[in-house]
């Protein structure tokens, strides 16, 4: 797990998502994850399958899994 708390009190976590292959995929995943309460920033990178999420508190794994599933992809876990 890659998670850290930055100076503003937010939490950064990196997740692995399988199936992303383009910018549209990145946008779909980012859009769904950004709907999770407390999320302040999402950056998805299709080429690596990594999604970096900044939130006010650690995120519930099931909420992340549901958001990624809604976008049509699979959450492989934390990077």
Image (spheres, helix red, strand yellow):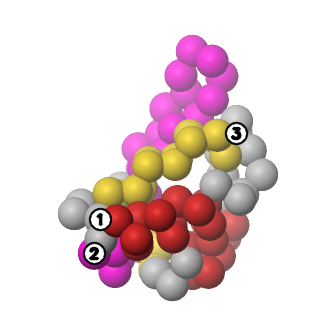
- The range drawn in magenta is 1-21
Displayed quadrant of residue 2: top left
Q: Name the residue tied to disc 2.
A: 21
Q: Residue at x 44, y 49 (%)?
A: 43
Q: Are marks 2 and 1 in contact (CB under 8 Å)?
A: yes
Q: Distance from label 3 to label 1 (Cα)?
A: 25 Å
Provide the secondary structure element on which disc 2 rests: loop
Q: Distance from label 2 to label 3 (Cα)?
A: 29 Å
Quadrant position of the C terminus in the picture: bottom left
Q: Name the residue tied to disc 3.
A: 57
Estimate the x, y position of residue 9 in percent, counting from the top left: 66, 22
Residue that lies at the very extreme toward the bottom in this rendered image: 72
Provide the secondary structure element on which disc 3 rests: loop
Estimate the x, y position of residue 19 in percent, counting from the top left: 34, 80
Dot in front, 3 or 1: 1
Q: Residue at x 57, y 15 (%)?
A: 7
Q: Residue at x 47, y 73 (%)?
A: 75
Vertical position of residue 68 compared to residue 8: above or below:
below
Q: Name the residue tied to disc 1.
A: 46
Residue that lies at the very extreme toward the front in this rendered image: 24
Q: Would residue 31 be visible to someone looking at this image?
A: yes
Q: Distance from label 2 to label 1 (Cα)?
A: 5 Å
Q: Are marks 3 and 1 in contact (CB under 8 Å)?
A: no
Estimate the x, y position of residue 56 in percent, counting from the top left: 70, 36
Q: Is residue 71 magenta?
A: no
Q: Give the mark count.
A: 3
Displayed quadrant of residue 10: top right
Of label 3 and label 1, which has the lower sequence position? 1
Q: Are marks 2 and 3 in contact (CB under 8 Å)?
A: no
Q: Would residue 17 be visible to someone looking at this image?
A: no
Provide the secondary structure element on which disc 1 rests: loop
């Amino acid at each position: 797990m890659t998670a850290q708390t930055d100076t503003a009190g937010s939490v950064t976590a990196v997740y692995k998502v399988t199936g992303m292959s383009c910018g549209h995929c990145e946008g779909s995943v980012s859009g769904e994850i950004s709907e999770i309460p407390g999320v302040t920033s999402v950056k998805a990178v299709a080429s690596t399958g990594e999604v970096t999420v900044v939130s006010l508190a650690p995120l519930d794994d099931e909420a992340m899994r549901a958001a990624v599933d809604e976008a049509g992809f699979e959450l492989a876990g934390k990077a």
